[in-house]
Image (cartoon, coloured by chain):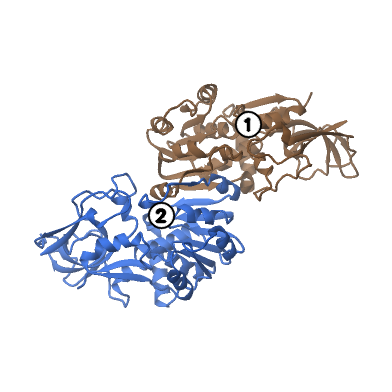
Chain colours: A brown, B blue
Amino acid sequence: MNKIILLDKRPVGKVSLNDFKFLQSEIPQPKEGEILLKTLYVSVDPYLRGRMNDSKSYVPPFQLNEPIQSGIVAKVVKTNNAAFKEGDIVSGSLKWQEYQVSAGTGLNKIESDGNSLTAYLGILGMTGLTAYCGLLEIGKPKAGETLVISGAAGAVGSVVGQIGKLLGCRVVGIAGTDEKVEMLKSEFHFDAAINYKTTPDLKKAIQDACPDGVDIYFDNVGAEISDAVLVNINKFARIPVCGAISLYNGDTSSNGLRISSVLVTKSALMQGFIVSNYADKFPAAIKQLTAWVKEGKLISSETIEEGFDHIPQAFIDLFDGKNKGKMIVDCTN
Amino acid sequence: MNKIILLDKRPVGKVSLNDFKFLQSEIPQPKEGEILLKTLYVSVDPYLRGRMNDSKSYVPPFQLNEPIQSGIVAKVVKTNNAAFKEGDIVSGSLKWQEYQVSAGTGLNKIESDGNSLTAYLGILGMTGLTAYCGLLEIGKPKAGETLVISGAAGAVGSVVGQIGKLLGCRVVGIAGTDEKVEMLKSEFHFDAAINYKTTPDLKKAIQDACPDGVDIYFDNVGAEISDAVLVNINKFARIPVCGAISLYNGDTSSNGLRISSVLVTKSALMQGFIVSNYADKFPAAIKQLTAWVKEGKLISSETIEEGFDHIPQAFIDLFDGKNKGKMIVDCTN
């Protein structure tokens, strides 16, 4: 039998397990030109929250009673398509199903090259590309500049910080537990890291950690954390806005400090983006990321949850900051 | 005798006449290498409000008991500097004094060429350059795109809109009186204009005026007006942030809609700027602006107040939107 996870209700505020529905069905059979895929690893990402709302965004909303879709690594278990053979490993945007058929379009074949398969959902996949393209194309870091990252211990943030260090920046991370702060400093060699939950005066803490001010602020979070960074930015600061996880569930005030004055005063640039805007940069980016991983200069940080049934809970855990690095669900057992 | 206007108190909230002090003194005498200038026209500009606060900004704050300084056109009435002769007309950042001495550095000589002298404070001065550089360098308008301008009847806004039309954009202005709205449509040929003070649903009014969405939002104002525009922006929108006049006096809530989500969703760019960032573009910009003025394609809109003593009131009037176009004080009588 096949298992499928559908969107049952559109979440209001915080997502709950009740918003999902599990379905069992026959394992589908591939028609001519199709392949049958078995799901191995599933990526859960904050941006999926936006797709659960019925609102116009950069990707169309999920439909009720349809399977959720995200980045997945899968194995070809049957093939009626000459481009794929049994045993091939692929990655792509696929459905939360144990088994699914596909025409193969939009899938990338993963060549076995010594990297773990989960890397293709993280550091060598959308996560790494998001970090690399957002930082380089918008942040335009120069050696000696100061880079501050919110959500620094998350999937994208931890890669941004490591790339920042490789490019010669002073890197300061903001995260939500002492354990994450410790990891940023010891594993990823950030110059400083701040626990925003236990720091009484975040503005002051950022000021202290950034004696020369903030040149680049890579924002994954938004809201109060961003307010505290913005008062510390330098003239001509660049702010790639990658996400606003604090706002996605609507549980944080959507009102806050107006920022147009500070943007004018500092001639600062703020640019929202999604990774697909930079598709033309992907080949060069993957080449660079792969080289850094191979040289051991870039470490992939992952939190692995076990079992297909745990996908919804793993997704929910993202919003409580339970992940360090990339959150992935292992469905191989 | 000479008259001088000093900053007497740092304004709290809205500026009042009591924040200024008038002083009389002897007319100064130019030393060797200096010139004596008589003030002809004084530009009053919203950004001066920021310099009245004792806070770090892109220009240093005014000092208490020192003269205010702004863009001024003046005449050389005595000269001990071979580079200037009596009767020369100059423009530059000068003090609010009827007479002042200068070493001549930083002054631009104005050649008599058929333009009115006030144009060098407005459309062929800082105002025109701000409009031109902000729109072209950040807004990057393409023919057929929709450009929305807040503070559209102000000095910069009215030039931005005209340039937008010259470049083939659909231009929609937001202003605060029916008279200004009428002026934008009839004199400056805006495609639509909205009185934000009398429009019950500004979001809806902008949506109606921009059937294809907003590609460029040139923001002079900030706050609620910007909130209403932002919900209507298109993917890859550009937002040059030129000013935030609604926030300068601190009389509007400095809290409002958080915008990082919309920036991500729309991959939008927001860039604060001041005109001096684009100094390398000035020669080409002035050439183009002069050509458009000469061809009658670009009209200078000015509100002229009479008399040196009225400079502080003219400045205060800016924040009540009493000006149409560039606010200038005529001190020639």
Residue drawn at point x = 58 percent, y = 31 percent? A154
The C terminus of chain B, quarter of image: bottom left
Q: Chain of mark 1?
A: A
For this rendering, which residue is in front, B31 or B174?
A: B174
The N terminus of chain B, quarter of image: bottom left
Q: Look at discs 1 and 2 and give the one toward the viewer.
A: 2
Residue B226 in view (yes/no):
yes
Residue B107 in view (yes/no):
no
Residue drawn at point x = 60 percent, y = 40 percent? A248
Q: How many marks?
A: 2
Q: Is residue A187 above or below residue B56?
A: above
- In this image, A319 relative to B39: left or right? right
Residue A5 position, x and y percent, is 78, 35
The kind of residue tagged 1 is: Leu
Q: Is residue B304 above or below residue B19?
A: below
Q: Is residue B310 above or below residue A191?
A: below
Dot 1, crowdedness within 10 Å: few (<14), some or many (≥20)? some
Residue B309 position, x and y percent, is 21, 65
> What is the distance, in whole Å, between disc 1 and disc 2 at their CAs?
38 Å
Q: Which mark is residue A182?
A: none
Q: Quadrant of residue B41?
A: bottom left
Task: Residue under label 1, please give it.
Answer: A318
For this rendering, which residue is in front, A248 or B163?
A: A248
Residue A60 position, x and y percent, is 70, 48
For this rendering, which residue is in front, B332 or A284?
A: B332
Task: Residue under label 2, please give it.
Answer: B246
- Do marks 1 and 2 share a chain? no
User: What kind of element bears circle 1?
Assistant: helix
